[in-house]
Amino acid sequence: MKETFEFTAKLKRTLFYMMGAGVVGILILLLYPHNQHARLWSNILACTYYFTGIGLFGMFAVSAGQIAYGSWQTLEKRIFLSLSSFARIGGFMLAGILILGVLGVHNLYEHVHTITHSPVTPETTTKMIYFAPAFWIGRVLVYATLWCIFSIVLNNFFARTDQTDPKVYKRSKLLCAAFIVVFAVTESAISWDMIMSLDTGWYSTLFGWYNFASYGCAAWAMTILLVIYLKSKGYLERVNENHVHDLGKLLFGFSIFWSYLWFDQFMLQWFANIPEETSFWVKRFGTGYFKFTIFLALAINFLFPLLFLMKRGAKRNFKVVGFAAAMLIVGHYIDFFNYTFVESGWNKEAVEAKKKEALKGSEKVVLYAQAAEEKKGTTTDATPAKENTAAVASEVKEAKKGEAEGGEEAEKPELTFSGIGIAEMLVFTGFLGVFLFMFFNNLAKRPIIPENDPYLKENEKLEVIYS
């Protein structure tokens, strides 16, 4: 029996309402003009990057299963392929964000200008080449073009697997292998170009893997929710608790994989204590809100699935696994929030100002000590005087008090750290509406079940008798 999804007017209307909520969120964010609307652009970047990653992983799931002669994903294959619909526009949206940053419309990547216009030194030469605007924008456009082409080609090609020609199925493995190569390179590179480059001083050698794990968790979670939704509407009758159990195991496994990479990145960078690596954690742990959201993401993305999805029954219960999937979609958005939002308010204003303030403070202590020595008519070095003269300490205290009461406050930078408020929720809802609209629109173009897939009957008989 062939099943074709009907994209009803009621569902379209609901998704348009969600998109409208996103527009309202954008309008609210326009009321925060600080830092060239950095909060607005951080929202757009985080959501675009997040949902594009889910789409890319959908193609990866189909390609990996196809190359491995897997039957487990046959009934959900159309769902994975339809997830990729957003990737057709997501890559170009990321390129657009980058172009607007280079043109100065927003300042998320403003610090890159300092690198490209700095004197040529051995330390800056490589970054100057890598962040040359033409090369930077050009490679992101190449990624976007490849993702769009593969999404269209894979969807059209796998529509032919409803035919009985075995040659078509064999050729699909070559196409999937080509995508795996493209995915391995572009998935890592886009994480460097769009997210890690928000702070050009910080780096992580496993950042690409980290993003891959986060994409995976979000994609498995989204698939579980969509499968449950489609079954509630009378589709996917042959999908049962065994198939959802398999998806639940993948969600649980990727959650543990993500947790391993999170701790591996944190532990190695903190233990090595290299300034270029620890700067990421120092900035966030030094800010109460982001310190909270980092541990919130860790609790949702690690502790929650560990305690909630460990049992066999939890992965076979549609309500339980559906709730866990919804939680993890939110949890991994918070994770990308932590990577994206802090930089626009930190690099330009807060860090440099605090460095200067610290340097000024250390210099003033010595100068005040020298002044105290001159008053006493002595010529000893200022350093010991700084350490053991009570008069110097008193003068320093008075000077700092005068600065606080004077014009120093006017020069203090305004910290523009963002929070997850109503605007962020609305923008996320709007992007989710666009993502689901493109998903359902693609799903309705062909039957949900690939009836003549050679592994379909094997997948229908799937029975999970362990874990």
Image (cartoon, rainbow, N blue to C red):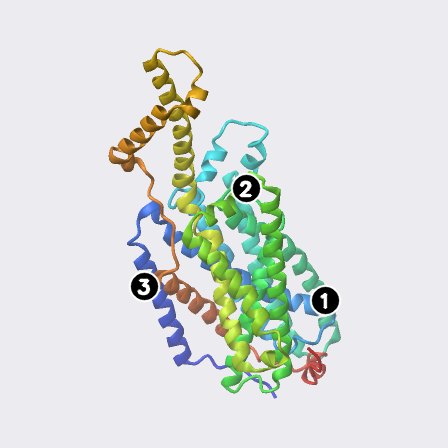
Dot 3: element: helix
Residue 182 visible, this angle? yes
Q: Residue under label 3, please give it.
A: 24
Residue at figure coordinates x 39%, y 30% from the top left: 361
Q: Residue under label 2, please give it.
A: 135
Task: State which quadrant residue 221 falls in.
Answer: bottom right
**Mark 3 or mark 2, whichever is nearer to me:** 3
Q: CA–CA distance between discs 3 and 2?
A: 35 Å
Q: Residue under label 1, please give it.
A: 67
Amino acid type, label 3:
Val
Residue at figure coordinates x 34%, y 40% from the top left: 413
Circle 2 Cα neighbour tier, 10 Å, few/some/many (<14 / 14–19 / ≥20):
few
Q: Nearer the viewer, residue 351 or 200?
A: 351
Q: Nearer the viewer, residue 153 or 110?
A: 110
Q: Quadrant of the C terminus?
A: bottom right
Residue at figure coordinates x 34%, y 49% from the top left: 37
Q: Nearer the viewer, residue 292 or 22?
A: 292
